Amino acid sequence: MADQEEVQNTRIADDSRSGKSDTEAVPAPPDVVELCKETFKRTAEYLRGEFEGTVDDYKLLETMNKITIAKYSEMKQIAGNVANSLQDLNEKYKSMQPFLDQIDQIEDNISTLEQAAYRLDAYSKRLEAKFKSLEKRSG
């Protein structure tokens, strides 16, 4: 291994003395040139395909975003309509509140009246029983 490095270093030293440099163009064999051209062509095709796939992905995302924006806009409008309807209902409820209070008061009065009717019925039954017992005694 050390011998190979030594030989390589000797070649580099000889090339630098003779005026040759590593950057001098050496004509490549025609088959290598053709292979390089084919490699670059196929690499370009591959990259073009990758970019087209990425562009398609971004177009899909853009379409999805537009649809989502439309849906959210629709949902916002529906929510606004629901809020307006709820506010209208609350206002109607507030305007009806005095009548609802009157209904509650009437219900309480009816309940009191019903209790009085039950007591009156019980009293009239007792009175009738007393009257019948007095009638039997006198008769």
Image (cartoon, helix red, strand yellow):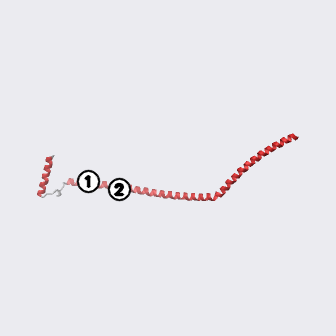
**Circle 2: is it few (<14), some (14-19), or many (20+) Cα within 10 Å?**
few
Q: Is residue 124 above or below residue 37?
A: above
Image disc number at residue 71: none
At label 1, the amino acid type is Thr
| Residue assigned mark 1 | 39
Which of the 4 image quarters holds residue 42? bottom left
Q: Are marks 1 and 2 in contact (CB under 8 Å)?
A: no
Closest to the observer, 22 or 39: 22
- Residue 124 position, x and y percent, is 79, 46
Mark 1 residue crowding within 10 angstroms, few (<14) / some (14–19) / many (20+): few
Residue located at (45% from left, 56% from top): 68
Query: Residue at the location (15% across, 49% down)?
Result: 5
Drawn side of residue 60 relative to residue 107, left or right? left
Q: Earlier in the sequence, mark 1 or mark 2?
A: 1
Q: Nearer the viewer, residue 105 or 85?
A: 105
Occupied quadrant, residue 27: bottom left
x%, y% of residue 127?
81, 44
Measured from the top left, where is residue 6 in percent x and y? 13, 49
Image point (65%, 58%), residue name:
98
Residue at 11% x, 57% y is 17
> Mark 2: which secondary structure?
helix
**Cα distance between the residues tagged 1 and 2:** 20 Å
Q: Number of labelled discs?
A: 2
Q: Secondary structure at mark 1?
A: helix
Horizontally, residue 36 falls left or right of residue 138, namely: left
Residue named by callout 2: 52
x then y, percent, for residue 10: 12, 52
Determine whether, in the image, residue 94 is placed left or right of residue 22: right
| Camera-side residue of 55 and 18 | 18
Three-letter amino acid code of the residue under disc 2: Glu
For the C terminus, the quadrant is top right
